[in-house]
Structure formats: structure tokens, C-alpha cells
Image (tube, grey):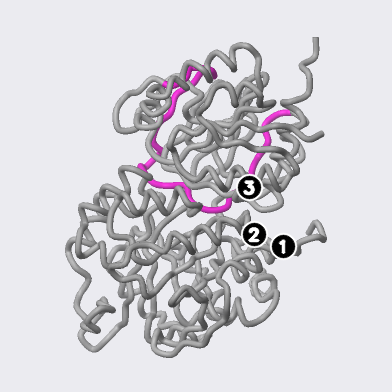
Amino acid sequence: MILKRLVGVITVRRGIAVQSFGYRRFLPLGDPAVLARNLDRWGVDEILVQAIDRGLAGPDLALLDRLAAAGLSTPLIFGGGIRSAGEAIAVVNRGADRVTVDQLLHDAPAEVEAIAAALGAQAVIAALPLAVQPAGLQWRDYRTGREGTLAPEVRDLFAAGHVSEALLVDWRNEGTPGTFDEALVAAFPLPHAPLILFGGLGAPEQTARLFAEPRVAAIAVGNMFTWREHAVQALKTALPGARLRPAHHAGTGA
Amino acid sequence: MRRTIGIIDYGAGNLSSVQRAFHALGHRARVTAETDVLDAADLLVLPGVGAFPHAMAELAARGLDRYVRDAAQAGRPLLGICLGMQLLVEESEEQRLTAGLGLVPGRVGALPGGGWHIGWNRLEVTGPDPLFRPSDRASVYFNHSFAVEVPAACRAAVARAGTELVAAIRRERIVGLQFHPEKSQAAGRALLARIVDALCAEPAE
């Protein structure tokens, strides 16, 4: 039976890993490759590196080369700046296993389809910054700060099978463990899409509650996994009922 | 013993991760499409990410389809990983019916329900093969939407995801892994180490 995953998130801004608080405030952490190596050693189930300032600059391939040189043995998801199928292929050729796309879902859905054709839809994750507002579920365009309903082209990409999982980002609560807005899960309108949840997660009680949702395939944690050593193993140990790989302690054989 | 691993470069995906995994085990690993370099390898590795027809076309464009077939039929050790494992069988229905390398009887079809198999899953080793037996119940990382079907005699391990999926195959000195051992942390490294040792050992007379 496929297991649920704890994903370690490394947020990168200007080439430096940062602690992020709602994508509004940032504290520098250092070399993303060092953080990735730690997460790898601590046995996180996947690593998501999100370069949040790439915009139209394309993916940071030099960053990927540094990550590849770290010799990770953990699956790597990479997002940030991917504008075309060619760039997604370059990202995978540089060491990523999967990619996230955000703006591309809206700007060029045909490119998302092309990525799925080249790499397989299992490699494509839709990153969706969302919030439940009085007007209902709202997708946030981080370029303009404007919000709106989930666009039909995004729904179509899921319906056509070009995207394998949805990364629901609670951008308002990102950076504060235990504050993820659980209403996002109920409000997300695509009932068959497997979900990766991110933003304000890491507290054991809430993580356990969300893992009990059949649609939730993975929970992604940022700051908490990077500011405290072995937080991955500690969280896994605190979730005995979740269908997770057991905590792994490098060098102990456990 | 330190071995030389020839990672076949036909333009398909994440080769550096595979190369680094073998380096971490203490082996020499060369990524190349040059047949004279591959000739010097103790173990050939056929990795792969993407779609089956494109991968077969890229192999053929470099003359590597014939090279891999001839090498395996001559008894040289061969490991296929993910799409590379799928290429070992006779045909695939991905996108359109496409002939594979035909080194292992079987075919590739879409996962039941047309979904994906993404994430960590436990291996169930199906036979007594000492190469695979220590990996029974080990969790490894899968990321695919098509799967192989092979005769029972070629099955080495399965995984369950609503249905039973072939996770590993073996036919003499040919091994295929549907999952990514290079991204399966300690469990993957341990299996890769045994594969190198077992396949590179001289075959019994």
C-alpha cells in the first residue's frame, strides 16, 4: 500500500535558503544544499525546493547543480521559474524527480500538457496558493496580489490527467506551525486530485488529523524541519497511526 | 570489489542521481553513449524518465538498442531502472504500441484506473532469490503511471497499490526495478550494492 509522505520544504530566495513567514518576511538560513543534505540524512520522504523569486527568469539550474552535487538519495521536487516543457526537462535532467508549476498553469496550460507528455504526468504537480475568503476558495496570483476563483484551465489540466497532484499552499499561514486552514481541503473543488498540503503545518495533532483525510497524500513542512535537528524523525514518531515510513536514523540501521 | 558501471546515456532523464548512487557505493560510474566505454563496464545500467516510444526512438537513434540487446544476449549484466525496466520487455501500449528490447517476456500497460503510483511503497519479494530477499518489506520510492506485466518466473518483487504491481523483475543476469533505488535512501543503496555484487559475479557453470 502506498504510504503517505512527509515532505521537507526548502524555500529559496536570491539563491539562499530562507525561513519564510507568509511569503512576506524572510530570514536567511544559508546554503540550500546543506539543508537538503540534512533532510536527506534525517529520512524525510521527499524534498521540495521552491525558488520563489524566479518569476520570468527561468529555473535556477545552478542551484540544481549544487543540489545534485549533494548526492541526495531522497526524491527531489523542484519549482520556481519553469516557463516551458524544455525547461522542465532541463530541471529533471539536472537531478529533480518532479516539478511544480504555478503561473504556467494559467499562462500556458499547453506547456503543462507538453511537460506531462515528455516526463509523464506523475512528474507534474500544480502549486496553488489558496485561501478561503468570504467569497469562497480563492487562488492568489503572487505577481499581482490579486485573488480569484480557480481558473477553468487548471481544472481542465487535472481532468485531462496532465497533472498528478495538487500542492495546496496556505500562503497566509505559511511559516507558523499549527495554523494551516483545514477549510482549504474541504473547499478544494477537485475531489479526485491527490493533495499535498503546505503552509502552517508541522504540529503533530493537526498533521495527524489531515493525514486521516483519504485525499491527503503528503504534508509538506518548511521552517520547522530546518530550524530543529531531527524534527522529521520527531514528527514521524509523534504520528504512530499515520501510514508513514517509520522514522529513519542514519547510521543506526533503524 | 570496485566495479565499473556503464550508465547508458540516451538523453532520458536524471542520470546524475544514478551515477552518484553508484559512486556512493564505491564504484566507478560512467555516463556515456560511447559503446567502447560501455564495453569496459562490468554492469550496464539503463535508466529512464519519460515516455516509452520516445525512449526507444532515442536508443535506436544512437544504435544503442542493438548494443543493449546484443550485450544482454551475450550474458553481460544489465540493470533497468523505472522506464529502463519497462524498455526491457517486448512492447508497451504507452501513447501507441511500441516494441521494446524484448529481453524479458512481457508488456507494459497503463496502471489500472489510469492513475499514478507515486511515493513510498513496500516491496513483497516473491521468491527465494538472495539478491532480493533482504529487501522484503523494505519501502522504496515509486513514480510511474505505466507498469510491466511479466510471467511469474520473471517476477522478483511486487508492490500493492489497490492492485498488485510488478516492482522488480529478473531473468538470469538481467534485473529491472520499477522504483528508483537511487532515491530510496538506505533501502535503495543496500539493494543496489547487492545487485552489483550478484550480477557482476561470474555466472555459475
Residue type at mark 3?
A: Arg
The reply to whether discs 3 and 2 touch (Cβ–Cβ < 8 Å) is no
- Pinpoint residue A55: horizontal percent, then vertical percent: 30, 71
Say which of marks 1 and 3 sits in front.
3
Report which residue position mark 1 lands on.
Answer: A248
Image quadrant for the C terminus of chain A? Answer: bottom right
Q: Position of residue A69 (x, y in %)?
A: 59, 56
Answer with the quarter of the image where residue A78 lies: bottom left
Q: Is residue B124 magenta?
A: yes
Kind of residue indicated by mark 1: His
Q: CA distance from mark 3 to mark 2?
A: 24 Å
The residue nearer to you, when weighing B147 against B10, is B10
What residue is shown with label 3? B20
* Mark 2 and mark 1: Cα distance apart in space: 8 Å
Within-10-Å neighbours for mark 3: few <14, some 14–19, many 20+: many
State left or right for residue B85 relative to residue B63.
Answer: right
**Which mark is nearer the camera, 2 or 1?**
1
Which one is in front, A119 or A185?
A119
Q: Amino acid at mark 2?
A: Arg
Please provide percent x and percent y for residue B136. Answer: 71, 41
Residue at the top extreme? B205
| Left or right for B137, reference A243 | right
Residue A197 sits above or below residue B66 on the image: below
Magenta residue span: B100-127
Give the residue at x 35% y 74%.
A186
Residue, disc 2:
A245
Pointer 2 local density, CA inside 10 Å: few below 14, some 14–19, many at least 20: many
Residue B177: image location, x then y, percent: 58, 35
Looking at this view, name the residue that lies furthest to the left.
A152
